[in-house]
Image (cartoon, rainbow, N blue to C red):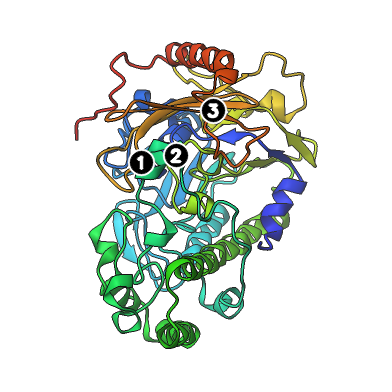
Amino acid sequence: MIETPHIDRIVKEGVRFTNSFVTNSICAPSRAVLLTGKYSHFNGLRDNRDQFDGSQQTFPKLLQQAGYSTAVVGKWHLKTHPTGFDYWDVLVGQGNYYNPTMVRMGDTLTHTGYTTEIITDIALDVLEKRDTTKPFCMLYHHKAPHRNWMPNLKDLPTVLKKEYPLPPTLFDDYEGRQAAKGQDMRIEDMFMSSDMKLLPEDYGEETGTGGGGAANFQAPGNWERLRQQLTAEQRKVWDENYDPIRKAFRENPPTGRDLIIWKYQRYMQDYLGSVASVDENIGRVLAYLDENGLAENTIVVYTSDQGFYLGEHGWYDKRFMYEESFSMPLAIRYPAAVQAGQTSDELVMNLDFAPTFLDYAGLEKPQDMQGESLRPVLEGAAATDWRKSVYYHYYEYPHGWHSVKRHEGVRDNRYKLIHFYHDIDDWELYDLETDSLEVNNLADDPAYSEIRTRLEKELERLRQYYQLPENNTGEMSN
């Protein structure tokens, strides 16, 4: 759907993981797992309402203590200031796509320009000024492609002309899937203002509203407020590219299924347009490593908070344990020790990042870290004792966005069992080999009763292994 030559380069020069998963598919909890190597119930950050306890052990702190120069630049999204870093310069909250406000070592600064480029400028400056007598660890984290998806000005003429094939489940009816019916993250309900970049005069009242979980996105004036945050020069280019879209919509407004398809195309143009800039700027960082003789002995990890729905099941956002949001991209390059061009089908998790980095730094994994070092997998050693299943747990309900029920589950190389709980008690079972789209719930199919029983036992084993609390409520104090 989109050319990403620099991300592709990391894949070609390293290892691509086909079964890479998140423990809890939502921004802040995923980042807390990355830092701590612990599940949400251990690191204290179950959903986006919680604040990260920066006093706890993290892999950057352990690297820092071992003599590494540590830095984080870009998205942080954990409410408390970063700890364990010699340098930090992070977005306020999620950040804006243009002219972001960032906090640099406690000082708040507002920049002018496109955020993806600004984050990269800062990252390269930090690398250039680092203490070259020390090894370094940098977390280089982008805001894009988080909602509300605003591409770079120079990319607009290209990205806004593209059309994309419709996913086969765009009009999913959620038959046999109670929790899927109750969510509030349909493309159908995306907002005409901040999501679709239309102004109130462009659409009627009945098409201007929608779901999406927060009134501030629904407000007709919200897009105009965001638009006014652009500089006059930025707004001029933006309007030159988006006014024809607004005009065409006013003159021939789509309805029904045509409106959903129109929203899907607009969503994809803006989302993948935002990704195009991420890829370009990753290329700048890779070029810096090449030009400064750092590429051979630097581990480069490309990943994400989680996966994301691009129209599958009619959705955007994440949260569910279905493949699109449970899976996350992962490619790791390390020319000094890892053979290029590999693909690994092992079941790996963001839980494994911290132990991996410590392993390559020559440090012991602390006993309370719950992940495993990926080093044996990366270096091609026989992984006969590698995990055969992964455990997932999502907590953000009924508070927060999108009305996705709390659930936990287990996945092995072929099957997935999910238990939705809190105000429902519903089970789903999928055979991923015969039903990769996850539309046929087999939980009550007698032919799969033995498989369900086996997975229920494995789910309980993993709960005990990862020391889940008995009450299973997921409630946290604010």
In the foreground, 215 or 296: 215
User: Mark 2 touching mark 1, by CB under 8 A?
Assistant: yes
Residue 116 placed where, x, y %?
Answer: 50, 63
Tag 3: residue type?
Answer: Leu
Identify the image quadrant of residue 250.
bottom left
10 Å crowding of disc 2: few (<14), some (14-19), many (20+): many
**Is residue 118 depicted above or below 59 in this figure?**
below
Q: Is residue 131 left or right of residue 27?
A: right
Which label is found at residue 404? 1
Residue 190 placed where, x, y %?
Answer: 38, 62
For disc 2, the marked residue is: 320
In the foreground, 388 or 294: 388
Identify the residue at horizontal 29%, vertical 57% (top origin): 107
Q: Secondary structure at mark 1?
A: loop
Quadrant of the image containing the N terminus: bottom right
Identify the image quadrant of residue 229.
bottom left
Q: Secondary structure at mark 2?
A: loop
For disc 3, the marked residue is: 442
Which label is found at residue 455? none
